[in-house]
Amino acid sequence: MTRFTQKMMLILLIFTSQLVINCSSDNDPINEEIENPTGWMDDLERSLGTGTKAKLNNWVEKGLDNTKLKEAFSKTSDKAGLMTKLETAISIYHQRVHIEDWNNIPGIAKSDYKSNGLLAGINHPDWNDPALDLPAIEAANFVDATATVLPSGTKIYRVTGGNPAGGYWTKEKPKSVGAVIGGTAVQPAWNDFSKCYEYEVPQKQTLKVWQGITAKQPITAGVINPHLPGGELQLFIPPAVRDDAFKKLVIQIPLSW
C-alpha cells in the first residue's frame, strides 16, 4: 500500500467518523422524536402545569389523534387557550373540531359552506296560532318546511346529551353519529350525541310539527370548509306543543351505535 493510499484511507476514515457523530447528535430533531415521541407533551407540561401530559395521554387513549393534537398545539400561539377548549369540549367530536381533525368527524362535507336555509319565518293559516309559527331563527335550519300533523302512533326520535324534549326530531331513528352530525347538520359544539330519545303520538291525538329538509351548517364559527351538508328530513316541534304532557311521554332508548 502506497503512502498516498494510506493518507486517502485515513482522510476517508476521519470523514466517515465525523459523519456518524453528526448523524447521531443529541440535537438532531429526528432522533429526538424517535427517542422521545412524547417530548412535545413534556414541553407543554412545563409551560401549562402539572397534569397536562396526563390529560393529553388520556385523550389520545380515548381516540384523539396524537399527530393532529401535536400539530394543533404547534400551530397555535395560545396553547393555554387550546388546552382550555379541549378540557371543556362536550365530546371527542367537539375536541376534533378544535384540533381540525376533519378525517375523524363523520358526516361532514369537505367543501365550502354556502347557506341554503330559509330566509324568513313561516305561519300556517289553518292553525291560526302565532305560538305554532316557525320563527325565522328556526326556519334558517330548513331548506323547505311544511306544517304537518302527525297522526297517533307515529314515533319520532332525538339524539342529544341535553334536553330530551328539545325542538328538533327525526322520523327515523339515526343509525350513526354521522347521520346526526352530517344529515341533520348538528354542530359537535351543540350536542354530545350520548343518548337517544323516542316519542310516540298517543292514541286519539295528533302532533303539530314543521317538517322539511335540513339546511347546511358551518361545522363551527369561522370555518367554511369543511361544513355540515344536511339533506335529511327533520322535524321542528314548536315550544307550545312541547308541554308537560309531551315531556312525560319522551323515553330514552338505546343508541343505534
Image: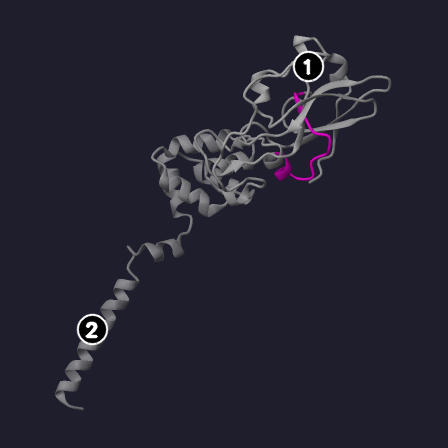
Q: Please say whether residue 53 is one of the residues in the magenta stretch.
A: no
Left or right of 91? Residue 130 is right
Residue 72 percent across, percent down from the top left: 41, 40
Residue 219 percent across, percent down from the top left: 51, 33
Please state the extent of the stretch shown in magenta in the rendering.
166-180
Q: Is residue 207 above or below residue 76?
A: above
Read off the residue under disc 1.
Answer: 124
Q: Is residue 103 above or below residue 1?
A: above
Quarter of the image with the N terminus is bottom left
Callout 2 amino acid: Ile
Look at the numbered disc 2 and give the secondary structure of its residue: helix
Q: Residues within 10 Å of mark 2 (few under 14, many from 20)?
A: few
Callout 1 amino acid: His
Q: Residue at x 43, y 30 (%)?
A: 222
Read off the residue under disc 2.
Answer: 14
State the colouring used for the structure image.
one colour
Marks 1/2: CA distance? 90 Å
Q: How many marks?
A: 2
